[in-house]
Amino acid sequence: MPPSFLNRPVDLLTATGSFEPVVEGAAWRRPCVVLARELCSFEFYTPSAGVGVAGLAAARLHARSAAPFGNAGWLVRRGGGGYGVWWWDKARIDPWLQDRFGQAPVQVFPETLAQQPGDGWRIVRSGQGFEAQHWKDGALVSSAWQRRPFDAESWTAFARMQRNPAEPPPDLPPPATRSPLTGAPSAAFELEALSPETIPRVAALAGVIAVVALTTFWMGQGLRLRALAEADGREAARLRASSPASSTSQDRSAALRIAAFRRLSDRPDMLAALGTALGIARLYGAEPESFDIDSASLTLTMPYSAMSSIDRIAAEMEASRQFADPRPTTDPATGTIQLRMRLVAQRPGQGG
């Protein structure tokens, strides 16, 4: 049996502020709360950047900027060719959570994510109302909640809003069913399922892993190139000693190869530098919105909220010895700070 501090129940938080047990003994390291569907708002977002890294960044930016609440919690989940974005009103639910759990961090997620995934069109009886759902490729792409059962008119209005549905909607609303809550979100803790509460921990861990992995990789590449250059140098010396008269062209070829290897090994490691820069920014709670990097320079674009720590971030960048001349500039029109800096070439074995 897991220790008591791991044996946390999963509760359903209703719209009246009451907690109803969903799972009595789920092994969670911290309290886990399912938010009743009527406490949440949903939108399916399709970024123009697709569903890669840039698409996820766009979806997270949309979640922050398009929230329907002044103090919003949110969660982004990939699927169905886009991203499902969930919001809830922290100003409303946080007092309830604090009354029950004190200052302990609480993992929250919408009730719909704790249901069994659907297929196509369905209506689920949820709490004190009904939720119309449209699923595509195992992902929720549309959701609407109302207190009364869906009739033909409200169902038609919901179905009409769907663009390019996976299958045509039924003419009449399907019978409402209950979907038992599993006590854990259906795959909601994937990498793409990021919320404001989880981003700092995920970012810090990912930053450390990225820095270590990329630095190790590029140092290995540099050592390999050095070894090849030294091998070519030894071969050129052997050829000169064994056949001085006929080795001129071979010497020249070996010398060219050595110079090429050395130039390549002396170039800045762009990926390693980017990993270092992102890790430093996140250590100070600054989440870069975008970046621009080439073989000579790196520019990070960060929100205005990083203003209080930008000087320390710049100092840490320079102290890492992978960057030089970090210069922050502000852009009031976009509410961002751009930190520009030169990349410094690093030899294997060099660094801080």
Image: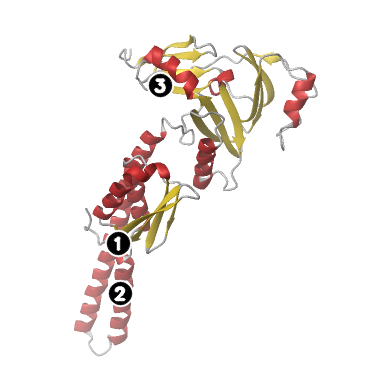
Q: Earlier in the sequence, mark 3 or mark 1?
A: 3
Residue 173 placement: quadrant:
top right
Marks 3 and 2, how far apart at CA? 57 Å
Marks 1 and 2, how far apart at CA? 19 Å
Type of residue at label 3? Val
Tag shown at residue 106: 3
- Residue found 54% across the figure and 28% down from its top: 69
- Residue found 29% across the figure and 73% down from its top: 258
Question: Could you say whether the residue bearing mark 1 is in a helix, strand or loop?
Answer: loop
Question: Could you say whether the residue bearing mark 3 is in a helix, strand or loop?
Answer: loop
Tag shown at residue 259: 2
Question: Could you say whether the residue bearing mark 2 is in a helix, strand or loop?
Answer: helix
Type of residue at label 1? Val
Residue situated furthest front in the rendering: 332
Q: Is residue 92 above or below residue 43?
A: above
- Mark 3 vs 1: CB contact within 8 A: no
Q: Earlier in the sequence, mark 3 or mark 2?
A: 3
Residue situated furthest left in the rendering: 241
